Amino acid sequence: MFGIDIMVIAIVALAAVAAGAVCYGLLYTSIEADKKTASRVNKVKAAETDQLKMKAARDRVQEMSKRRKSVQDSLKDLEKRQLENARKTVTLKEKLVQAGMSTTTSQFYLFSALLGFVVTVLAFLGGTPIYVTLGLGFAAALGIPRWVVFFLINRRKKKFLEEFPNALDVMVRSIKSGLPLNDALRLIASDGQEPVKGEFLRVVESQQVGFSIPEACGRMTQTIPLSEVNFFAIVIAIQAQAGGNLSEALGNLSRVLRDRKKMKAKVAALSMEAKASAAIIGALPFIVALLVYLTSPYYIMILFTDPRGHLILGCSAVWMSIGMYIMRNMCNFDI
């Protein structure tokens, strides 16, 4: 009975195998055709996907090329404007605005004339020779007021550089919170610290009279001539032409300005010894002359009474001026 069951199972298995082989033989062509069809379909889909990827890559490359060209055009335009501004002579009115003074040019000239007149009268009453009196009055009328304006311009620039990175950080946080650039500029113009507040207020007022934001920011270099302000105008102009993440660009600019400030402080600290040495060397001849005059006045007065002494003093003054100029350039570094 057991042997009969094994025979039956073997016969059934062989019959199944034979039936499968016959079906495979009959359906082999159809199966291979389906496989080839599926392979072709997959290849076509892969080719279409590759074409889409290649098209997307070409579109990205074209977009980057357009943006790069737009940035290059913007930089060329800005460089052209900078060259024109550099060749342009700064008028007295612009210098007064850069110094933050509300004085008009006529008031400035009137004050200069009054100062020269007062100095001339005081020198005349002091008994100085007439040519020395006129020279002092002329120098006071032309030199002292302009030196004051130059001093105020430099002081205003320093104050602006101290506050400008903070203003950029406020703009970055405002833009990240969702405010547009116009509102960020207005925020600095209303809540900032002088002189940054006044400069951004001019930008806002320029927009109200028809200037675009890049043009208004570019005009800041006329009232506060600093390379840092020029960087800010370039960033705004490029963002307006080519787009991009303005908050990231302004954040990078703020970080660069702070690094420049740190570098300037480090260079000033490292060059302080050389500046002190230069100051001591420059003051040494005057100190020695004063000490000799206090101890032996008749010994040194011949330099002031004899014509040969005048020649020696003149030559010494020229050489001292050249030496001080060289030492000053050796101790000063542009960053």
Image: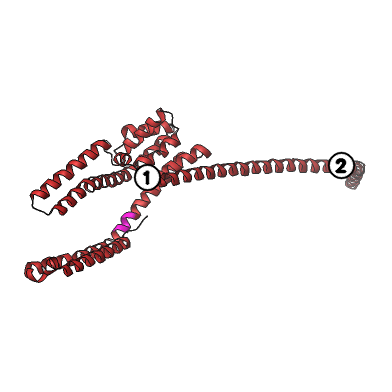
Work out which quarter of the rendered image holds the C terminus and state it.
Answer: bottom left
Residue 301 drawn above or below residue 18: below
- Mark 1, residue position: 89
Pointer 2: residues within 10 angstroms few (<14), some, or many (20+)? few
Residue at coordinates 39% horizontally, 33% vertically from top-left?
184
Q: Where is residue 127 in the image (x, y as percent from the top left)?
A: 8, 52
Residue at coordinates 15% horizontally, 65% vertically from top-left?
287
Q: For the stretch drawn in magenta, what is the main secondary structure?
A: helix
Nearest-to-viewer mark from 1 and 2: 1
Q: Where is residue 77 in the image (x, y as percent from the top left)?
A: 50, 43
- SS at circle 2: helix
Give yes or no for residue 178 being in the magenta stretch: no
Disc marking residue 33: 2
The quadrant holding residue 322 is bottom left
Pointer 1: residues within 10 angstroms few (<14), some, or many (20+)? few
Name the kind of residue labelled 2 in the image: Ala
The quadrant holding residue 91 is top left
Q: Position of residue 156 (x, y in %)?
A: 28, 43
Colour basis? secondary structure
Q: Nearer the viewer, residue 23 or 31?
A: 31
Q: Position of residue 186 (x, y in %)?
A: 37, 31
Instruction: Mark yes or no: residue 39 visible.
Output: yes
Disc marking residue 36: none
Task: Indicate left or right for 59 with 291 as reference.
Answer: right
Kindly indicate whether the residue at mark 2 contacts the one at mark 1 (C-beta within 8 angstroms). no
Task: Indicate left or right for 101 with 239 as reference.
Answer: left
Residue at coordinates 20% horizontally, 69% vertically from top-left?
312
